[in-house]
Image: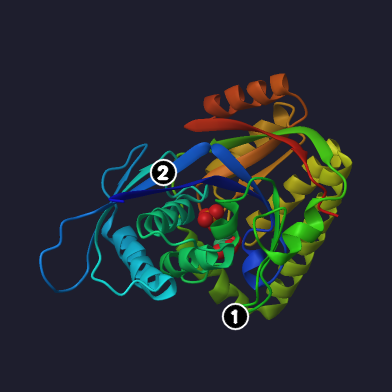
Amino acid sequence: GHTGTGRAHGKAILFGEHAVVYGAPALAIPVPRLPVTATATRLPSAGEGADQISFAIAGPGTGSATPVEADDLRHLVAEFKVRAGVTERVCVDVLIDCAIPRGCGLGSSAACARAAVLALGDLFGRRLDARTVFDLVQVSETAAHGRASGIDAIATGATAPLYFRAGLARELPVAMAGEGFPDAARAGAAHPWEFDGLFVIADSGASGSTKEAVEMLRGAFERDPRTKETFVREVAGLTHAALRDLGEGRVDDLGARLTENHRLLRDIGISTERIDTLVETAIAAGGRGAKISGGGLGGCMVALADDPRRAETIAGRLHEAGAVRTWVVPVGRFASYA
Ligand code: PMV
């Protein structure tokens, strides 16, 4: 055909951001109400020459792709051709409709890349397996972040909360309840569980650079490896405990761990005053716990509420305290992680 489409969605990290870059596990939830759709259209190509690829991203507060984003996505097309065995000259126009606000830790870059990869696969009639899609999204994520754990690449396509661990270098990521990775089948079936809590996500309105945050930590950790070890160990402990809380429906315990993880991130310099204020506001409004979410240095925070009315109250207070957007995300019913 002449067009192909691909879809992805936003995500929020509940536990383990930054530590996940150093091999710790992390927990994330998909946010399907922040959808991304990419449409790839074949352009009439005359003769020979280099590929012609144009990208545009439309969405809240955005125009076309920034040059950096367009470059990241161009890397992705070159790699797509290699992996999908496309040898012909490629002339395509990729239009991405992205409902995820950008630069606030909700996975916009990975979701745009994922939707674009799937749209290209569709356009060229290639069935891409989960591993190939992951690798291709990682090409542009690595270009965008410098060092990307891969959690966004998976969470932006996941249909259930996600436990993620990427080992050091290039080990196969383990995505339980994700899609298509070996452990998913093993982890998925057993005991369906329900979790009554709801997450309130709030955008602080100040965008933060994940790349900058990751680089800042790398520098700090190189100078002081003990800080790194302590941080990674403590976050990993919280993530594992949170996994059990989720599976057993312990909303209060899960909330306390969120706040604890926030403290660890704040202490290593990832939070901002504005985010700290939102975290305190959410807890004062009856949230069971709250923390910064994602790359940090701005961006979003997430709070846990035990019922829908409380979630609305928290969202209202967060707006009063300066949040520019909020979303309430119920966790729901899922197959066991155990
Ligand atoms: O894309 P963000 O801002 O949600 O950050 C991704 C999470 C990090 O752990 C900070 C980076 C990574 O690659 O895992």
Is there any visible trace of residue 322 in the rendered image?
no
**In the rendered image of this protein, does residue 227 appear above or below residue 39?**
below
Q: Quadrant of the C terminus?
A: bottom right
Q: Which residue is mark 1?
A: 222
Looking at the picture, does residue 273 appear above or below residue 72? above
Q: Is residue 233 above or below residue 286?
A: below
Is residue 256 rendered to the left or right of residue 123?
Answer: right
In the image, residue 125 lies at what x, y percent? 40, 59
- Res 62 visible: yes
Identify the residue shown where x is 26% and y is 48%: 64
Amino acid marked by disc 1: Glu
Q: Secondary structure at mark 2?
A: strand
User: Residue 216 location, x and y as percent?
Assistant: 52, 68
At x 19%, y 55%, the residue is 43
Which residue: 84% across, 42% down?
Answer: 192
Q: Amino acid at mark 2?
A: Thr
Residue 37's tag is 2
Q: Please state which of residues 108 and 115 is positioned toward the viewer in this rendering.
A: 115
